[in-house]
Amino acid sequence: MTDPRRAIPRTDTLLASAPFVAAAERLGRDVVRVAITAAQQQARDGSIGPDEVPATALAGLPTRASSLTAVLNATGVVVHTNIGRAPLSPSAIEAVVAAAGYVDVEMDLATGARSRRGAGALAALLDAVPDATGALVVNNGAAALVLATTALAAGREVVVSRGEMVEIGDGFRLPDLIASTGARLREVGTTNRTHLRDYADAIGPGTGCVLKVHPSNFRVDGFTAEVGLGELRGLRRPDGSPVPVVADIGSGLLRPDPLLPDEPDATTWLRAGATLVTASGDKLLGGPQAGLVLGDAEVVERLRRHPLQRALRVDKLTLAALEATLRGSVPPVTAALHVTADELRPRVEALAAALGRGVVAVEGRVGGGGAPGVPLPGWAVEIPADAVERLRVGEPVVLARVEGGRGLVDLRCVPADRDGDVEAALRAALGDDGPDPGTPTP
């Protein structure tokens, strides 16, 4: 009797067939081979028949080459670090796709000679912040601060107020970050009050720079005092030389925004006296992850020519996305921050009505460590709290939030053309729960 396992299709035969050739072009030959091998093993074990191997192998292939999963952000948190902070604008996405091939990232096409890397993105930054005469882009906000303090103060002192000794995400602390640059941190003042004389007393021949940090993820109220940038800019070493003032605004706001009156922006801080401003590109700016350095052209050039800059430089995709963010369509972060409760309400009510659910007033958040005290009034569909987890593992993935024992689906950060996808995901997640009037629509 012939062993049925002899009928199992050969690996090379399957790899040469049209469906698997197409899959290999999309996912890679090794991934496809693993799926075929797994299906063949099932046939050898007798769990499937030899004729089922091709279909089983195709069904076992991943849907995409990357393990990252796209999500719909229905949390109401605009800059959400755990899901990639800022989503790119249509202009930036188009620019990234165009830059995925060969591009003139360091070439002048008119002359054929080598040119300044990312000149377009740097010009766009300077156009957006005319008060800056120099600009530089590195790979994230922390890198911008590390490069600035390394270039200006390695082996010297960085003077900073104790009230600005912040801890940022994932446990990273400013003192540790500065220490890694080879600079010595000189703390002045107290947690709640720092005066100009505190800085002046600390300035000496070994002072590399003064650091001003915006504590973006917390606020200190009450009996407080801090020193403005204009006063700091006037500080001098004993030999009369000026002390550079590095100001970290964090969030990446380039110009004042009436919605965020207490959030510092690059333009205002440069006008106030900062030598350099450092910031993130993927927060309030709404672009790709990047560290922005803006300010005095001579000082920026010192940073650009420092050996560390080479290790921190960004790739062509980031440069393309950043320039398109600055020059192109409105970034989703900007749109989500400025959409009003009245504009959101019809969409939320339509979704709630389709599901037989209630609508409740909510407050979204800026997120990303920015504007911690600023609420974003809006509306959300109320669902059972346990449905939030089912949304998170469904298809498409929808991230909602639980607050006060109830699930809330906030459409602030969801593109309007994806409301139908949210509805389908909710129907699947609600399952047998059935219609629930929830809280009546006000």
Image (cartoon, rainbow, N blue to C red):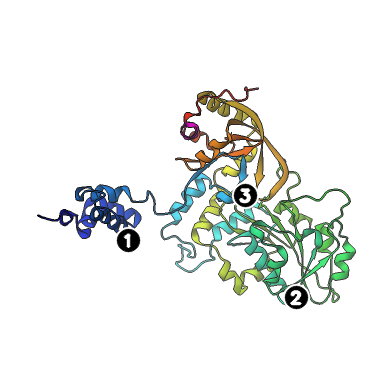
Q: Quadrant of residue 8?
A: bottom left
In 3D space, how far apart are the residues under numbered discs 3 and 2 (Cα atoms)?
32 Å
In 3D space, how far apart are the residues under numbered discs 2 and 1 (Cα atoms)?
52 Å
Q: Amino acid at mark 2?
A: Arg
Q: Amino acid at mark 1?
A: Asp
Quadrant of image for the N terminus:
bottom left
Provide the residue designation for mark 3.
285
**What residue is shown at x 33% (from left), y 50% (from top)?**
60
Q: Quadrant of residue 157?
A: bottom right
Q: In the image, which is nearer the foreground, mark 2 or mark 1? A: 1
Numbered tag placed on residue 218 in the rendering: none
Is residue 3 positioned above or below 150 on the image?
Answer: above
Is residue 85 positioned above or below 296 on the image?
Answer: above
**What residue is shown at x 62% (from left), y 50% (from top)?**
283
Is residue 85 positioned above or below 418 on the image?
Answer: below
Region in magenta: 422-431
Provide the residue designation for mark 1.
30
Magenta stretch secondary structure, dominant: helix
In 3D space, how far apart are the residues under numbered discs 1 and 3 (Cα atoms)?
39 Å
Provide the residue designation for mark 2.
156
Whether 29 is among the magenta residues is no
Is residue 437 positioned above or below 68 on the image?
Answer: above
Q: Is residue 321 left or right of residue 133?
A: left
Residue farthest to the left?
A: 1
